[in-house]
Image (tube, helix red, strand yellow):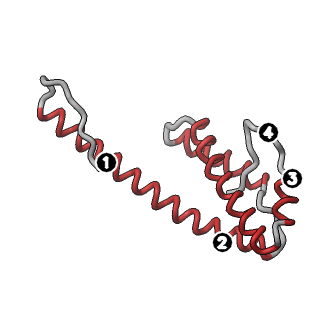
Amino acid sequence: MAVNEELPADAGQDAINELQSIRQSIDNIDAALIHLLAERFKFTQSVGRLKAEHGLPPADPAREFLQIQRLRGLAEDARLDPAFAEKFLNFIIAEVIHHHEKIAGDSSGGARAAGAAASRPADPAHPSTSA
């Protein structure tokens, strides 16, 4: 969806064309991110089903810690703020845990999910998450 903004009257056509081109690139990257996230969630749903079938807790703090450290390093290599990457991953992982808890609840009446949720640390700066 293109949104036309009012540009100064003296904005040259070259600048307008370049702005549109850059924005189209951003739109393409946004679409790719959504598709990649959808693909990632397909795999994490499989993990959630496997955990539920075998009575494993929805969250895996050790795995989460390693993932955060790995993504912080990747962010640094990509010249992206590692704190931003960590916040982004924590957001995704929180959603993954929510899905895993729902899967566990659907398959066992919620007992395992409730126990796992209660066992997670309550550090708001670094919520326990499972990717």
Q: Secondary structure at mark 1?
A: helix
How far apart, in angstroms, are the residues tagged by discs 4 and 1? 38 Å
Label drawn at residue 25:
1
How far apart, in angstroms, are the residues tagged by discs 3 and 2? 23 Å
Q: Residue 2 at x, y = what percent?
A: 26, 46
How far apart, in angstroms, are the residues tagged by discs 2 and 4? 27 Å
Query: How many C-alpha atoms fall within 10 Å of the one at disc 2: few (<14), some, or many (≥20)?
Result: few
Residue at point 12%, 29% (across, down)? 12
Up the image or down, 57 lies above or below 29; here it is: below
Label drawn at residue 118:
3
Label drawn at residue 54:
none
Residue at point 83%, 45% (across, down)? 121
Residue at point 52%, 58% (across, down)? 37
- Whether residue 2 sits left or right of residue 82 in the image: it is left
The reply to whether the C-beta atoms of the residues labelled 1 and 2 are less than 8 Å apart is no
Counting residues from the start of the chain, the first of labels 3 and 1 encountered is: 1
Q: Residue 98 at x, y = what percent?
A: 70, 57
On the rendered image, what quadrant is the C terminus found in?
bottom right
The reply to whether the C-beta atoms of the residues labelled 3 and 2 are less than 8 Å apart is no
Amino acid type of the residue that numbered disc 4 sits on in the rendered structure: Asp
Amino acid type of the residue that numbered disc 1 sits on in the rendered structure: Ser
Q: Residue 110 appears in which quarter of the rendering?
A: bottom right
Amino acid type of the residue that numbered disc 3 sits on in the rendered structure: Ala
The reply to whether the C-beta atoms of the residues labelled 4 and 1 are less than 8 Å apart is no
Q: Residue furthest front?
A: 109
- Closest to the camera, between mark 3 and mark 1, is 3
Q: Secondary structure at mark 3?
A: helix
How far apart, in angstroms, are the residues tagged by discs 3 and 1? 44 Å
Counting residues from the start of the chain, the first of labels 3 and 2 encountered is: 2
Residue bearing mark 2: 46
Label drawn at residue 123:
4
